Image (spheres, helix red, strand yellow):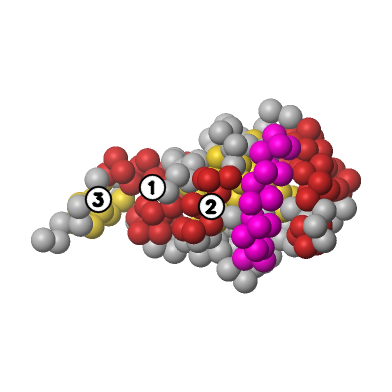
Amino acid sequence: MHVERRIDSIRIEGDMDMTDVQEMLRKVDHTQLKAFCTWEDIEKLCREAVRYHTASVCIPPCYVGRVHEAFGGQVTICTVIGFPLGYQVTAAKVCEAREAIAQGCDEVDMVINITDVKNGRYDLVEEEIRQVKAACGEHILKVIVETCYLTGEEKEAMCRAVTAAGADYIKTSTGFGTGGATREDVRLFREHIGPDVKIKAAGGISTLEDLEDFIRLGCERVGTSRAVGLVQ
């Protein structure tokens, strides 16, 4: 039987409960990271985040200060560091993180240096994460490992590095690589991260089924630009 209900402008089809939808949205980092995104795009993102109570807005660093001025106290501001390729020098990433926080950022998503991974220098990756976490202080740090470029052994090594360096989350993807989040990678993360590390899935999450699945698999955050549109 097809059932459709509208509650607070959210349309629910089928058997999904309104509470379930709200709980899913609270785990969404509502994202707009296109290179050509305008202030109008960012304003729309923030208004949606306020209306639907998403976990955060994930925006380019250049918009952090403006969003803080316009929406400070209404949204949690997340930005990206070393994005999207990750091969900036560590000092640049540390500087980016400090500046973002000074401008009002609450959470930081950094990209690891994948060249270090491919060169087998897992120690350098761990040290870089540690330095960026120190720059973040009490603010949440999510570490993007870009799983589409990594072998299984390298993914396991990144789980250990993220854990040892004291980061708060391990994140699958930038959304700008050759692939996004997979259920298999989330399962691998669950097996190899430490007990204090959480999981964020991002990249290619385009349906409510995807959103439900990744949360059910244990993701505390899901990064997507589509979640609000899917439930409207």
Crowding around mark 2 (Cα neighbors within 10 Å: few <14, some 14 to 19, many 20+) is: some
Q: Quadrant of the C terminus?
A: bottom left
Rendered position, 38 above or below 142: below
First in sequence: mark 3 vs mark 1: 3
Crowding around mark 1 (Cα neighbors within 10 Å: few <14, some 14 to 19, many 20+) is: few
Residue position for label 2 = 188
First in sequence: mark 1 vs mark 2: 2
**Amino acid tagged 3:** Met
The image quadrant that residue 142 belongs to is top right
**Amino acid tagged 2:** Leu
The image quadrant that residue 116 belongs to is bottom right
Q: Which element is circle 3 on?
A: loop
Task: Write down the region rendered in magenta.
Answer: 146-166
- Kindly report which numbered mark, 3 or 1, lies closer to the viewer in this rendering: 1
Residue position for label 1 = 216
Work out whether residue 140 can be spotted: yes
Residue in the foreground of this view, choosing between 153 and 93: 153
Can you name the residue that lies furthest to the bottom here? 178
- Kindly report which numbered mark, 1 or 2, lies closer to the viewer in this rendering: 2
Q: Is residue 163 magenta?
A: yes
